[in-house]
Amino acid sequence: MNVYENCPVLESERFLLRLVQKDDCKDLLKVYSDRQAIPLFNSDNCHGDLFDYQTEERMMQAIDFWIFSYQNRYFVRWTIIDKKTGEGIGTVELFARDALEGDGNTALLRLDLRSDYERLNEIKELLLLLRQPACRLFESDSVTTKAVPAAVERREALDESGYRESDCLLTGDDGTQYGSYFVCDKHA
């Protein structure tokens, strides 16, 4: 399956992930204007975008860019929907890139959650849901994601989900090096 031709819907007991849509704007604005959540987002190699969106207009610009990026096969951005409330409570971005360690490529995962969902069990459920599809869809041997030191529950969830912190740095397009990455082998 080519993820850029047919984007799958992913589902766990609590969450449904589907390709981001313009109708997600109001829900996602609650995520990307959340002052507690913004410092935990991975904005590495995003050309200065810190994902701090305070207006519907700015949120819609981001969504338009995410849709454009999907259409041009740069990355896939799914909206995470809480099935109990029907609300979009975050997004997942995935794309293939060179692995941090060794040969091959990895599926780079960006997981942006509203702060009230930045909890151990919710993060673990999402990580479990994403590992195998990420590796399959992006023909990767591993999944790599960032968790800054302040993201205490996220780091614990990564540890409990088979991820290990990497000493290697991710190098951006401009040569900047970024740390705080965790890697999980697809067989973990």
Image: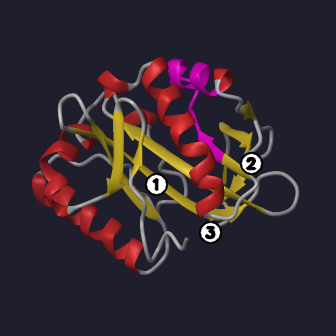
Residue 184 pos. (x, y %):
72, 40
Marks 2 and 3, Cα distance to the nearest angstrom? 13 Å
Does residue 58 appear left or right of residue 92 in this picture?
left
Q: Is residue 128 above or below residue 64?
A: above
Whether pointer 1 and pointer 2 mark residues with C-beta atoms closer than 8 Å, the reply is: no
User: Residue at 76% of width from left, 54% of height from top?
Assistant: 141
Q: Amino acid at mark 1?
A: Glu
Q: Earlier in the sequence, mark 3 or mark 1?
A: 1
Dot 2 corresponds to which residue?
Answer: 169
Does residue 20 appear left or right of residue 174 in this picture?
left
Residue 161 pos. (x, y %):
64, 27
For disc 1, the neighbor class at 10 Å (few under 14, some 14 to 19, many from 20) is some
Residue 176 pos. (x, y %):
65, 58
Q: Nearer the viewer, mark 1 or mark 2?
A: 1
| Residue 145 numbered tag | none
Residue 181 lies in the magenta-colored region: no
Q: Is residue 3 above or below residue 81?
A: below
Quarter-wise, where is residue 118 in the image?
top left
User: Residue at 42% of width from left, 36% of height from top?
Assistant: 12
| Residue 93 numbered tag | 1
Q: Which residues are magenta?
A: 144-158
Q: Amino acid at mark 2?
A: Leu
- Mark 1 falls on what kind of element? strand
For disc 3, the neighbor class at 10 Å (few under 14, some 14 to 19, many from 20) is few
